[in-house]
Image: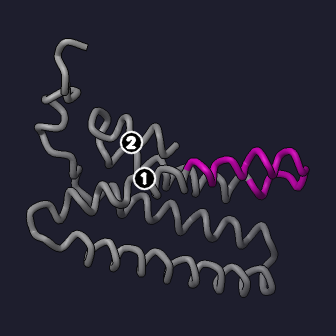
Amino acid sequence: MAALAGARADAWGRKPLFLAAFVALALRGVLYTLSDNTAWLIAVQLLDGVGAGLIGALFPVIVADLTRGSGHFAAAQGVVGTVHAVGGVISMALAGQLVVLAGYDATFLTLATIAALGAVLFWLAMPETRSATAVTAGPVVTNPAE
C-alpha cells in the first residue's frame, strides 16, 4: 500500500488515498464483529495493512505539502507523530475499558465509528494538498535519451 501511495499520490491526490485509509480501518472494525473464524480474522487484518501502509506513506507527504517553504517540516512531523502516538494510547485504553464493560463486538463497533467520524472530519476539513504542478507536470525525465 505504501508503494501504491507513493506511485499514485500525485496523480490521484493525497486526500482520496488518505480517506481510503480511514475507510479501511473503519471497515476492519465492523468486519471483525461478523466472525471469529481464524481465516476470516486474518483476512480482515489485511485491512489494517491497507490503512497503516497508506497512512505511513502519506503522512510525511501531506506534512511536506503543508509546510513547504516554511522551514518547519521537522517540527510539524514531530507534532503529527506525537498526536498519532497519543491517539494510539488513548485508543488502546478506551478499547481495554470497553471490552471489560461491553465486550469485543461493542468495542470494535465503537472504534470503527470513531474511524468513520475521523474520515468525515478529514473529508470536510482537510483540503487536497498536492500542488497543481504535480498533476500537470507528469513524470520527471532525467535523461531524455532513455
The residue beneath circle 1 is: 57
Q: x, y percentage for residue 73?
A: 22, 69
In the rendered image, the vertical position of residue 9 relative to residue 28, given as above or below? above
Instruction: Tell me which residue sits at (42%, 42%) in the image.
Output: 5
The numbered disc on residue 66 is none
Instruction: Tell me which residue sits at (23%, 50%) in the image.
Output: 128
The numbered disc on residue 6 is 2
Q: CA distance from mark 1 to mark 2?
A: 7 Å
Q: Quadrant of the rendered structure where residue 135 is?
A: top left
Tally of marks: 2
Instruction: Tell me which residue sits at (29%, 41%) in the image.
Output: 13
Magenta-drawn stretch contains 117: no
Horizontal side of residue 140 vs 94, given as left or right: left
Q: x, y percentage for residue 63?
A: 27, 63
Q: Secondary structure at mark 2?
A: helix
Quadrant for the C terminus in the image: top left
Q: Please report the bounds of the magenta region as a residue range.
A: 32-50
Q: Is residue 125 visible?
A: no
Circles 1 and 2: CB atoms closer than 8 Å: yes
Q: Three-letter amino acid code at disc 2?
A: Gly
Q: x, y percentage for residue 62?
A: 28, 57
In the rendered image, the vertical position of residue 27 relative to residue 89, given as above or below? above
In the rendered image, the vertical position of residue 108 relative to residue 52, given as above or below? below
Horizontal side of residue 2 vs 50, given as left or right: left
Instruction: Tell me which residue sits at (77%, 66%) in the image.
Output: 105
